[in-house]
Image (cartoon, rainbow, N blue to C red):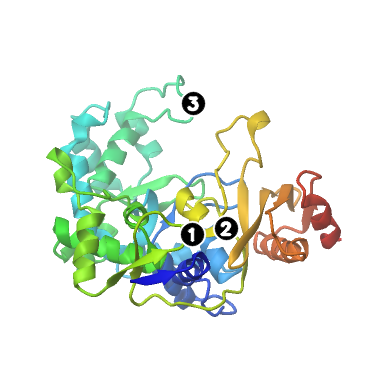
Amino acid sequence: MLELSRAQARRIALGAQGFLDKPHDPPTMRTFARTLERTGVLQVDSVNVLARAHLMPLYSRMGPYDTTLLDRAGSGRETRRVLEYWAHVQAFMPVDLWPAMQFRRDHYRARRSKWGFTADATLEPRVLDAVRLEGPVTARQLDEEFSGPRTKEHWGWNWSDARKVLDYLFLVGDVAIAGRTSQFEVLYDVPERVLPRAVLEAPPLDREEAGRELVRRAARSHGVGTAACLADYYRMRAVPGTGAAASQPSAKEAIADLVDAGELEEVRVEGWRKPAWLHTSARRPRAVRARTLLSPFDPLVWERDRTETLFDFHYRIEIYVPAPQRQYGYYVLPFLLGDEIVGRVDLKADRVARRLLVQAAYGEDGAPADTAEQLAVELQRLAGWLELDDVVVAPRGDLAGPLGAALT
């Protein structure tokens, strides 16, 4: 059995995620397509303290790029390359994954009454008719017809009846996301006006086929990973379920099939307690020369246990932690240098004053001597992409002083 050191596994993972790809200047739609093929999905999140979550992984791999590339990739029917769906969580995924997600749509429909769905079920056909007639449309545009006054007892989750129904219809595939407004509101429409005809007409994959396809893609994006890693990428079950869960594909079954097919190889990784599987086409680089910042929602680091085993980097997002209890800050990004995560910075884009605020900066144990200088270059590059004029460093964290000096 092949044995990999932790450093080898780390470099394989970085290569699989696109950190070996030669930059294009400027990045083009071809660059975008290559990057999407590496990551597989781009997680969507509404937090905009720095940049939207789905924009940052593209930047981390492609460098400064025109964000209208993603807009173009997610618009038009026959030209559409990506679609939002519940892939990892809410995420942009390639449109050709739609047939593989039929099991998930069926699962949500079958369990409708079990997840506390509170909207009036009689609204569903009426809301769907309204989307068919008026779409693309936001939930807010349907509120007057289908919803009463919004309640205020649960700040941040005061969804109207129209929104609740639309979200259910989205999960089961009766409506799709056509795009978003400038305020980041979802635009809903019927799938036949959103998805390419060939995708809609493709036969859905059965449970076993879907499991193999999702694990295959997860393995390509990971390069090497445990069963838990491969299951998490598309939020599958790690092992077969029983009862209603039996309709869900399991990573364990899919891994066995892909090993038999010669697509995966079982390996041992230094320091990993569980077996791992290597995609047989994964690159095995001797060196990775990356220098970039990673979003908290980047697929390289979103599975925190995997991040710790690969990079010896303990990472938690502290957005929901009260400010006095935060260890590192509100929106902290790991700094990748070479094939190691060597620091972390709490960042905020002050768009009014056109400043990139470094609210804290910390180095990791064993970080190279030039970490502050390398981070300064990366922060200036990031500021330029965000159309900010200055980088301002607050005096918090052991790296703040050297970083401020490097920037001046």
Q: Nearer the viewer, mark 3 or mark 2?
A: 2
Which amino acid type corresponds to the residue marked 2 in the rendered image? Leu
Give me the disc on residue 300: 1
Residue closer to the observer: 3 or 340: 3
Residue drawn at (21%, 30%) of the image:
114
Above or below, comparing residue 199 to residue 179 in the picture: below
Residue drawn at (61%, 52%) of the image:
333
Distance Cα–Cα, label 3 vs label 2: 29 Å
Q: Secondary structure at mark 2?
A: loop
Give me the disc on residue 155: 3
Q: Quadrant of the N terminus?
A: bottom left
| Crowding near the residue tagged with mark 3, few <14, some 14–19, many ≥20 C-alpha atoms within 10 Å | few
Residue drawn at (41%, 70%) of the image:
3
Q: Percent from the top left, x then y, of residue 37? A: 39, 70
The quarter holding residue 253 reads bottom left
Sequence order check, earlier mark of 3 and 2:
3
The quarter holding residue 30 reads bottom left
Q: Percent from the top left, x then y, of residue 192? A: 22, 58
Q: Quadrant of the C terminus?
A: bottom right
Q: Residue furthest top?
A: 153
Q: Secondary structure at mark 1?
A: loop
Residue closer to the observer: 176 or 291: 291
Say whether marks 1 and 2 touch (CB < 8 Å). yes
Distance Cα–Cα, label 1 vs label 3: 31 Å
Distance Cα–Cα, label 1 vs label 2: 8 Å
Q: Percent from the top left, x then y, of residue 337? A: 64, 66
Give me the disc on residue 134: none
Which amino acid type corresponds to the residue marked 1 in the rendered image? Leu
Give me the disc on residue 294: 2
Residue 303 visible to an observer of this rendering:
no
| Crowding near the residue tagged with mark 1, few <14, some 14–19, many ≥20 C-alpha atoms within 10 Å | many
